[in-house]
Amino acid sequence: MKRFRGFVIKEIYHIFRDFRTLMILFGLPAVQLLLFGYVLTNEIKDAKIAIYDPSKDVVTRKLSEKILSSGYFMLEQNLNSVAEIEPAFRRGEVKLALIYEPDFAGKLEKNGKARIQIIADASDPNTANMLVNYTTGIISNYIASMNSEKVPAQIIPEVRMMYNGELKGVFMFVPGLMAMLLMLISALMTSLSITREKELGTMELLLVSPLRPAQIIIGKVFPYVFLAFIDACIILGLGNAVFGVPIRGSVTLLLLESLLYIFFLALSIKKFNIRLA
Amino acid sequence: MRTILYIIQKEFLQVFRNKAMLPIIFVVPIMQLIILVNAATYEMKHIRVCVVDLDLSGSSRKLISKYSGSPFYQIHSSSFSYKAAEDEMKKGDVDMIIQIPAGFEKQALKDGKAKAQFVINAINGQSAGLINAYSTMILVDYNREIVAENFSPAMMIGIKSISADYSYWYNPKLNYKTYMVPGILVLLITIIGLLLSGMNIVREKEIGTIEQINVTPINKIQFIAGKLIPFWIIGLFELAFGLAVGKLLFNIPMEGNLGLVFMSAAVYLFVILAFGLLISTITNTQQQSMLVSFFFMVVFILMSGLFTSIESMPQWAQNLDRLNPLMYFIRIMRMVLLKGSTFADISHHFFALVVYAVCVLSLAIWRYRKVS
């Protein structure tokens, strides 16, 4: 037991006297969490669009204004012809093009019908899909407000987003980051620490020492498990304090699970490594 | 020049005589491509729905059949208690609950308006947004049908309508895989390039062979060139291999000029490899080098627009993203491969990469010292 303790202490010295590694171990999760919590979102905001409006009448102006004031879209350019759409898409300047038909208001008044064409750059399929949906939604709202009195029977959806009402990206991201960083620390770091002993030749010293294989393995794993566990707590704490990521279930269960996960990763890589040696 | 050739030969020998290296270079990326492309798809198929129909009328059944008939939805279960449905969502068995309150049909006939509840599991914000969009679309469709059924053409006079036709260019079937393959290819050559070059000099430092090189007449530039070129060739080969696999397995479109792709890749690889070398010169152990590379890689990847769109990031982050080489190259790949952009279209991104390559390379050469 005393030998084992000595071995663990040696490992801890290895880690703590390598200041750069230590900085990264604790700086990495904090910086990434803060950066991505503020940066990564899935919501669509200010998507750039182009409008081709040959009729330029009251209705098209009002409709364009409605679309642009929704917050989802931003006018990048006014097109002078339909042929300008393709180059704009290819340069990646706009994501969506709106095309009104000529004499829009006149046709709407006379025939009760007018047409708009929406063209989306679907090289990014999901964004295209969402943008088209938003646009058609705004247009149908506009139609509904035009016909306010004559609206026929309608089903109105009442949508509730469970667990993450504002559709925040962080909620999805924090647990993922935690799994990823724990894997990085426990799997990569421990396996590298063994490879290093082999490359430096100090592995030989360990092999001829009276320490048993099990002691070497556990001794190697132990400090990293401890560090990884602290990292897990930092991520959870920061996520909760700064971004309000909730922990709705039992905290103890979560921590126990992460401990299990760390152990499993550290040991599995270890086994693989020793067999290679 | 001959000196460089010898270093290149030495590096290649070192790579190819390392048993673990070959699979890392050739097998792992292809497996990652296949797995990642299939896994990292946000495409919505088989949204699992739990139906809580408390009305059990013709209208409610018709509404539900609209959803069960769509290829996007799959009725997973039905229940008469909202509580039970919510429990199922908690277990992760369903993605969405449709609740139709009692008296739904009566209200629709009397007031011309009725409400249906959609409860969506929004842990994954993006997919929740998509589910919401799809569901609303189906409902709009359903509303239109009601109007067509209940109103005679004579009553329709005076009701104005604007018909909105939409078309999806470049990817009419909204196939998400064709969007992901070019991005993931960039990811793979980045990982390989950065890790290989980042670990390389540090490894010589750890083993001690760097001493031997320090006492040779090889100068800085020859040494760096000799270290870079082998990985540069491996990276380009990797890209060609990946593109072939992408074409064969996922049938990705190649609208633009492939020469343009490789020209940009050549510059991009210089950026990444020089970056790796830079990391290699400022760290002392493989462990440190690995961690530093990982740190930058994760930041670069997540901010590259591979998974989330860059336009929706806050302005300061978009400005910061100008320092991200991955962002430029992923854009170039997607624009050229999917949209057939020409050099004029991508020139801005291309020259940004050139400037980047020159800067990082000179920094790496300046940082590398032939002293231990």
Image (cartoon, rainbow, N blue to C red):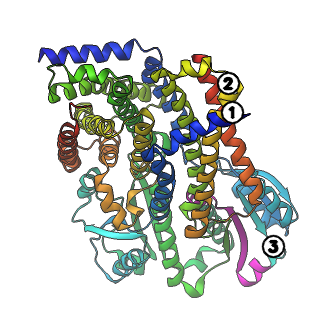
Nearer to me, B364 or A128: B364
Query: For the point 27% across and 27% down, which residue is it?
Result: B232
Q: Residue furthest left?
A: B1
Pick the residue in front: A200 or B149.
Answer: A200
Quadrant into which the C terminus of chain B falls: top left
Give the CA separation, mark 3 to mark 1. 66 Å
Q: Which residue carries the number 2 mark?
A: A211
**In the displayed structure image, the side of residue B111 where residue B84 appears, left or right:** right
| Magenta region includes residue A214 | no
CB-based contact (under 8 Å), mark 3 and mark 1: no
Q: Position of residue B220 (x, y in %)?
A: 16, 29
Q: Position of residue B328 (x, y in %)?
A: 29, 47
Q: Position of residue B155 (x, y in %)?
A: 60, 80
Which range of residues does the magenta coloring cover?
Answer: B107-131
How far from the left and from the top, in percent, is residue B173?
Answer: 48, 45
SS class, disc 3: loop
Tell me how many marks there are.
Answer: 3
Question: Which residue has dot 1 on it?
Answer: A4
Q: Nearer the viewer, mark 3 or mark 2?
A: 2
